[in-house]
Image: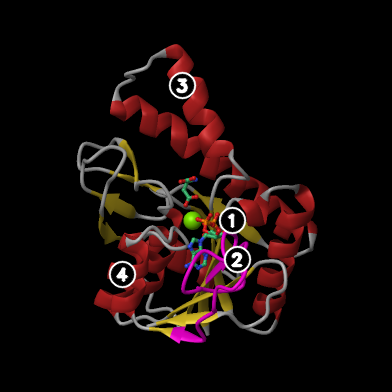
Amino acid sequence: MLIVQKYGGTSLADAQRIGNAAGRAVELARQGNQVVVVVSAQGDTTDLLIEKALQINRQGAAREMDAYLAAGEQMSAGLMAMAIGAMGYPAVSMTGWQAGIATDGVHGNARIVNVDTCRIRQELDGGKIVVVAGFQGLDPEGDITTLGRGGSDTTAVALAGYLHADKCQIFTDVDGVYDRDPRLYSDAVRFGRIGYEKMLGLIENGAQVLHDRSVELAREFGIPLEVLSAFTGEPGTIVG
Ligand code: ADP
Ligand code: ASP
Ligand code: MG
């Protein structure tokens, strides 16, 4: 099977959590699967980077902001590939553009328009786990773009779609999708399964558990997403 796994910032916040995620990817690969791991920036890295930029220029050019913010995910990708390597499994990290992700030119909120999967395929066929930096791509001018806050989910779904993956798993810091934010409402109810439309409705009402564009893309490709806890790995919610 070809499996795409995405890990969010909290799920990669320290060396131990990166190790947990790496271990899960290695286990799947050792079972004979091809594995692509999409990573977000660690913890609140993106918030901290934005804060720092605002201290320097309150209206920094959107192009430069993207070039700068994309670094958060690149650092995670390098660390994840090294963590996998430390477990004795070959891995290669890639930026969004090395992974062939082409977007439109809307800096700060770009849409993925194509993925050239050639390099990823080559590395998977060479027996490696491929680690891709989420949240980023390259526009027609050859400039770095970012996909909007939470956009690493969309990177994962786009890769799963263009690679015809068998599974797309979104690992996060809650154990699935609930009818309300489970961090704010202790009586929130978890869905075993939820349709794309209902999921988009929840997002419209503020549920940031998935990037809206990731659900739209999953619907276009007809790919079910699994949202599950990076900490337990127990079955979560199937979206779609
Ligand atoms: P990640 O860093 O893994 O991408 P996010 O912070 O983007 O994680 O999304 C996970 C968070 O979404 C949870 O910690 C939770 O507080 C919040 N959330 C909001 N609404 C919901 C919901 N309806 N179901 C599940 N989680 C939700
Ligand atoms: N790091 C980016 C953000 O914080 C993208 C993501 O986490 O999906 O919005
Ligand atoms: Mg998110």
**Alpha-carbon distance for marks 4 and 1?**
37 Å
Q: Depth check: 6 or 31 in front?
A: 6
Query: Viewed as shown, does residue 154 lie left or right of 71?
Result: left
Q: Earlier in the sequence, mark 2 or mark 3?
A: 3
**Alpha-carbon distance for marks 2 and 1?**
6 Å
Q: Amino acid at mark 2?
A: Ile
Q: Earlier in the sequence, mark 2 or mark 4?
A: 2
Secondary structure mostly seen in the magenta stretch: loop
Q: Residues within 10 Å of mark 3 (few under 14, many from 20)?
A: some
Q: Which residue is mark 2?
A: 129
Query: Viewed as shown, does residue 6 lie left or right of 195?
Result: right
**Alpha-carbon distance for marks 3 and 1?**
30 Å
The image quadrant where one finds the C terminus is bottom left
Indicate whether 67 appears above or below 118: above
| Numbered tag placed on residue 53 in the rendering | 3
Q: Are marks 2 and 1 in contact (CB under 8 Å)?
A: yes
Residue found at x 35% / y 46%: 148
Q: Depth check: 209 or 52 in front?
A: 209
Instruction: Determine if the magenta segment contains residue 178.
Output: yes
Residue 205: where, in percent of width, then height?
A: 34, 61
**Alpha-carbon distance for marks 2 and 4?**
35 Å
Q: Earlier in the sequence, mark 3 or mark 1?
A: 3
Q: Amino acid at mark 1?
A: Val
The local secondary structure at tag 2 comes to strand
Query: Viewed as shown, does residue 167 lie left or right of 182?
Result: left
Q: Earlier in the sequence, mark 4 or mark 1?
A: 1
**Residue 230 occupies quadrant:** bottom right
Q: Which residue is mark 1?
A: 92
Q: Is residue 117 visible?
A: no
